[in-house]
Image: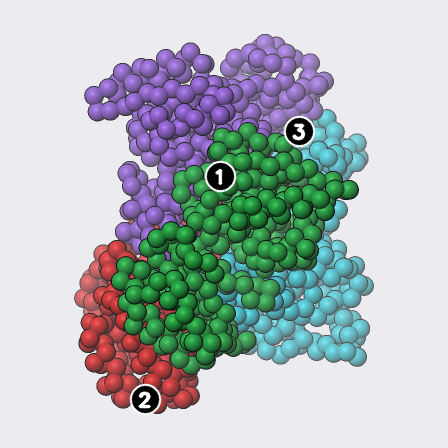
Chain colours: A green, B red, C cyan, D purple
Amino acid sequence: MTEPAAPAKTAILLVDCPDRKGIVASIGGFLYRHGANILHADQHQDNKLGLFFLRVEWDLAEFDLDWAALLREFEPLAREFQMRWRIEYSGDCPAVAIFVSREQHCLVDLLHRHQIGEFTCRIPLIVSNHPDARALAEFHGIAYHHVPVNGSNKAEAERTQLELMERHSIQLIVLARYMQILSPDFVARYPSRIINVHHSFLPAFTGARPYHAAFERGVKLIGATSHYVTEALDDGPIIEQDVARISHRDQVADLVQKGRDLERVVLARAVRWHLEHRILCYGNKTVVFD
Amino acid sequence: MTEPAAPAKTAILLVDCPDRKGIVASIGGFLYRHGANILHADQHQDNKLGLFFLRVEWDLAEFDLDWAALLREFEPLAREFQMRWRIEYSGDCPAVAIFVSREQHCLVDLLHRHQIGEFTCRIPLIVSNHPDARALAEFHGIAYHHVPVNGSNKAEAERTQLELMERHSIQLIVLARYMQILSPDFVARYPSRIINVHHSFLPAFTGARPYHAAFERGVKLIGATSHYVTEALDDGPIIEQDVARISHRDQVADLVQKGRDLERVVLARAVRWHLEHRILCYGNKTVVFD
Amino acid sequence: MTEPAAPAKTAILLVDCPDRKGIVASIGGFLYRHGANILHADQHQDNKLGLFFLRVEWDLAEFDLDWAALLREFEPLAREFQMRWRIEYSGDCPAVAIFVSREQHCLVDLLHRHQIGEFTCRIPLIVSNHPDARALAEFHGIAYHHVPVNGSNKAEAERTQLELMERHSIQLIVLARYMQILSPDFVARYPSRIINVHHSFLPAFTGARPYHAAFERGVKLIGATSHYVTEALDDGPIIEQDVARISHRDQVADLVQKGRDLERVVLARAVRWHLEHRILCYGNKTVVFD
Amino acid sequence: MTEPAAPAKTAILLVDCPDRKGIVASIGGFLYRHGANILHADQHQDNKLGLFFLRVEWDLAEFDLDWAALLREFEPLAREFQMRWRIEYSGDCPAVAIFVSREQHCLVDLLHRHQIGEFTCRIPLIVSNHPDARALAEFHGIAYHHVPVNGSNKAEAERTQLELMERHSIQLIVLARYMQILSPDFVARYPSRIINVHHSFLPAFTGARPYHAAFERGVKLIGATSHYVTEALDDGPIIEQDVARISHRDQVADLVQKGRDLERVVLARAVRWHLEHRILCYGNKTVVFD
């Protein structure tokens, strides 16, 4: 947790912990005593696993704790309930990097959404293993880094990419149809901070060429999935999925075309929910407070 | 609010009131002090109208207030925050009447769901202006009351129906494709306690023969809507809607057929949510805590 | 192909063959010369595999060929184009057997649809490895055969089932949540004539307990699939699929409940399309002329 | 019908006429005699109105009629069956104008689809009553015409627009969230050649501010509709519709955001189907051969 960069209007507290009596009362009481005006609150209990999840957002106008004081004052309560927790400030505008390969439909979509204010973030750079999207990046005034990747230079390419991430203090990496597999080392540095879109309804059709596989199997719906990237390919916590109907008339090219519309929306929703601090991971699953 | 009829495992508190600081802390503190183990909690703030809505369900095992004590102890807090509120006990099994005309697809569906435990309620009687569904009612061991309605006997028919409702202490009336319009007087006796299914995507195609109207207009999706019945025809608070895709190949008969599948599910969801005390009405809208 | 049992109003010709110039002209000319008034026609070309598929339905009122003559006259044309073909008469009312285990939601749904005329078929018997659905069968006036299946009597049970199928000249077997696996021998006797519903979005979550598997994986949509049964478990040609949205709030029991609504509709659509002769299988896929 | 501008690979015949025996045989025979290799064929009969609709696409490689000959030779057959008909060549690349106001999400989407080859057309110009989208137009190398419209200059503005349309031989006008109402005179010049997207599920919420109206009514799904523009506002033949689920949590701003995703896809599908000559209008409805 870092100090908020800019004066914020609202703060968001995210909590998960063992479920126990008194959590809601304690947090509610804490916020009330310090003048918080709650704007949104959502909680979830996994009664089977005995876990409690909370997202609460409040207006800071009359809240009497600054960032450092909030951390200090909340700490005992967090300890008592064995919370994993974090505070986010709505004024913050985290730095997001987009990785892309040749297909630009997700990139075009993300950049337009950013432009019209759907995403609260900065996008200081786009990284690609191809030169194709440079003009688009420049149109949006975003630096474009062409980092070719091939069989022999993968480690070096990742070093270059990681340097870029660090230089720009990147807090979220969005793989917008980036067709290279990141190494476990790379992934381990950004836990729950790399979002990928896979062009199938996971767990069906993992790996390469899912539309071809879907066509061969003769499914009647195709899907797309956005998920956090983990070491295991296409197996990270699922954030969002959607499907579209197809028929025997649809050839692979039609699946690809219809799939683009799915990929765009499931990726964009995942990015927005992440930026709005609506996602909590546990086990290999997500809680999405919408 | 009536005393729970049977020993209950959980209690549900439903609240709406002007939004103010401290509501969550106060209710959370109250429940905690009395030993409530919260199982589910969901809240909603309409920041524009300044309204607060809450649904909280807790385990009664270690809760130290019985029904009468709970009402008495909660009252001051409710008054302080100007709450409209009610308590429901999960052990309760309210009496539900189903009204039906000729088409039985919703009735068949509701009775099967009831049979397999999707609905926590009793269904002491079915009322119909036609004799058609008697055998089905008998198969399920439910009393069937054939109350014919025509141009001249409407008031008398409603008197008969109301007597039946009162005799069986009916708390929810489900219009499962009941094709007669209830009088304002009848409706006024069961505010937010009569659920209807209309076979269109409201507010499109109100009134009679919506599938014919949809066909004429050439829409590409048809819909169905479940809603609470108010004096204004097809204008009550919407609980649930769903749609299905149609094409130029579909004739009116196909719309009717596809629509039956929609009607079933939107009505069943509305009934279940009502029985689980998940619905709060405000203005002409619903909050559905799912 | 068997002679139509009853006077029919319309006939349906189903064809698949290598794609070649002149097929449409030849069939169109043939039907025209014999006075057919075409009511519906749908065709499909798989340009990649070079295959042609046709479904054409015509009014028999002025058609000048009876069943035997039609077969005789069409044969040369069929041979010329190397067609696989069949003729169906709309007056026909094939015998359908429904197999069910404990869960009756699909059975209830199928029987009601049959009752209101959605399916053109007879249902002379229901087969179950449990006694549970007997009352329902009797309510619909359908013979109920309880054929218990356990580890040691499977072959014998299948012999009993096959005798029942033969005695009733069963032409379609619908597995309406029948939880036993049919032997390859059994399946081989009814190629493209056994329809199953699997409670997942195939090919995800094949095998047992798919809702549990879906819950563990943390998917955001659940599905159901109807398909023809082949030797390979859950791998036959897919006829229909549908999905429903779930969230972190949904436990396995909620998935099961939401899934029932999917299972009902995907199975019912498959049965209706089969009975309306809208499905052609090729490879491991289906063409569904809707 | 104009002579094809470029050598074409396939031709498309679109027909509607009174339904009569022999149409399919006659057209099939005609195409076969002239060496057409049929790639796709789709037909529809409105048995109630007695109308027949056909779309057939064939490979021109061995077809023995050029454009002029085809028109001449087909004419007698067309006359015999009282056909309304047209021939389109796939090589043709019609000129499309996009009209836009301030919101650019549909424009961004259409231009990217055009760029990656989803639309077979040229886009020589974009017309707007605002200057906002000029940079985007220039990025795509498309002329941008800012034609301000206000209460007093509407007729003059339309003259300017019509001159632009004529100068560029525009064959399709796409209103991509163009918020001005075109005059009946303008509309009459482009019958079935102006496609609009309306941000509601028509016929619900016609006119201005449909998301506000949807919010007020408390619907549980919002929609978007693409349609041909006719004199009657929001009442032209519907081409495509889609919906998205909303809940009580969604404020008007959320509806606007979710609606943008719907608007994009329903407009894009309509444009593609139009350009692929898949749409036939009759009465106030469309047949969409997909």
Tag shown at residue A111: 1
Tag shown at residue D39: 3
Tag shown at residue C268: none
For the residue marked with disc 3, what is the amino acid? Leu
Where's residue A282, x and y in %? Answer: 55, 66
Chain containing mark 3:
D
Viewer-nearest of labels 1 and 3?
1
For the residue marked with disc 1, what is the amino acid? Leu
Seen at 58% across and 52% down, the residue is: A194
Where's residue B217, x and y in %? Answer: 37, 39
| Closer to us: C142 or D42 | D42
Chain containing mark 1:
A
Q: Tag 3: Cα neighbours inside 10 Å, few (<14), some, or many (≥20)? A: some
Q: Is residue D2 left or right of residue D105?
A: right
- Label 1 to label 2: alpha-carbon separation: 56 Å
Q: Is residue B169 left or right of residue A124?
A: left
* SS type, badge 3: strand
Asked if residue B115 can be seen in this view, the reply is: no
The residue at which mark 2 appears reads as: B65
- Label 2 to label 3: alpha-carbon separation: 75 Å
Seen at 68% across and 37% down, the residue is: A148
Seen at 39% across and 45% down, the residue is: D257
Q: Looking at the picture, do discs 1 and 3 lie on one chain? A: no
- Label 1 to label 3: alpha-carbon separation: 39 Å
Viewer-nearest of labels 2 and 3?
2
